[in-house]
């Protein structure tokens, strides 16, 4: 569907974001790790309550909600798949970042979820996490690594991915139910996105 030029109304109770898809088709030059005492831990397998808690702490302010709407069996089918790897960024024995690598599509790796908690934004922790993500992804038999982000995410997300070696290749408009209207997310989450009910 082609969206017409100009303004389009979004119904009350819905949210709309511009989604940018980015990819790389060859391993980029390695970027130096910033100084910091971070570690990476693979969750094998990720416990669902742990996953939901970290997902919420990393993504709630960016309106990540697709995984919080899944039941246990639906979520387990994804994160317990042998072709999906879940990692935590560890700081002082606390899990403060989420990295999910999805290898379910042959020859590709999707950064399904990537982010750090609010207290680490701007600290260099995301650079450390991206370096590990690309090392792991490109250590496998892949010819493409890709990710998507949207206008609900941090304003620097697209630039961060581009500095990491990704190039934008597609843009979409996504319309969805506002997770703050049904209690999936707290009413005061993502203050940069107005609630229109």
Image (cartoon, grey):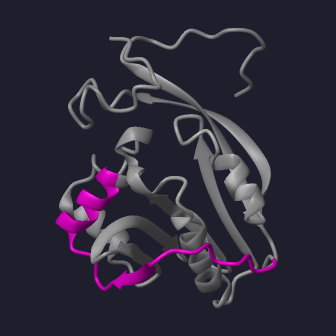
Location of residue 45 (image quadrant)? bottom left
Numbered marks: total: 0
Q: In the rendered view, would you say 101 is above or below 195?
A: below
**Foreground of the two, 157 or 24:** 157
Q: Is residue 90 left or right of residue 46?
A: right
Find out whether residue 49 is within the magenta segment: yes
Q: Percent position (x, y) of residue 127?
A: 60, 67
Find out whether residue 39 is within the magenta segment: yes
Q: Percent position (x, y) of residue 148?
A: 62, 52
Residue located 67% across and 9% down the image: 7
Q: Is residue 186 left or right of residue 84?
A: left
Location of residue 120 (image quadrant)? bottom left
Q: Percent position (x, y) of residue 82?
A: 41, 84
**Foreground of the two, 94 or 16:** 94
Location of residue 52 (image quadrant)? bottom left
Q: In the rendered view, would you say 87 is above or below 49?
A: below
Q: Is residue 89 left or right of residue 1?
A: left
Residue located 80% across and 51% down the image: 169
Give the position of the C terminus as an image quadrant: top left
**Foreground of the two, 90 or 23:** 90
Q: Percent position (x, y) of residue 167?
A: 80, 57
Residue located 73% across and 73% down the image: 144
Residue located 51% across and 14% down the image: 10
Magenta extent: 29-57
Q: Is residue 71 left or right of residue 126?
A: left
Q: In the rendered view, would you say 6 is above or below 59?
A: above
State the residue lying farthest toward the front.
35
Give the position of the N terminus as an image quadrant: top right
């Amino acid at each position: 569907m082609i969206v017409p030029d100009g303004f389009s109304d979004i119904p009350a109770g819905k949210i709309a974001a511009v989604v940018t898809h980015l990819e790389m088709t060859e391993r980029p030059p390695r970027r130096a790790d910033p100084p910091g005492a971070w570690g990476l831990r693979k969750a094998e397998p990720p416990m669902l309550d742990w996953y939901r808690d970290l997902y919420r702490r990393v993504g709630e302010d960016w309106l990540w909600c697709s995984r919080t709407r899944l039941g246990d069996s639906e979520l387990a089918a994804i994160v317990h798949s042998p072709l999906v790897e879940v990692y935590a960024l560890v700081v002082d024995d606390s899990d403060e970042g989420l990295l999910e690598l999805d290898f379910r599509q042959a020859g590709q790796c999707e950064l399904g979820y990537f982010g750090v908690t609010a207290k680490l934004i701007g600290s260099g922790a995301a650079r450390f996490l991206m370096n590990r993500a690309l090392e792991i992804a490109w250590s496998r038999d892949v010819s493409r690594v890709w990710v998507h982000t949207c206008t609900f995410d941090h304003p620097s997300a697209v630039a961060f991915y581009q500095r990491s070696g990704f190039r934008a290749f597609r843009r979409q408009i996504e319309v969805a139910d506002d997770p703050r209207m049904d209690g999936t997310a707290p009413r005061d989450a993502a203050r940069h996105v107005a609630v229109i009910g």
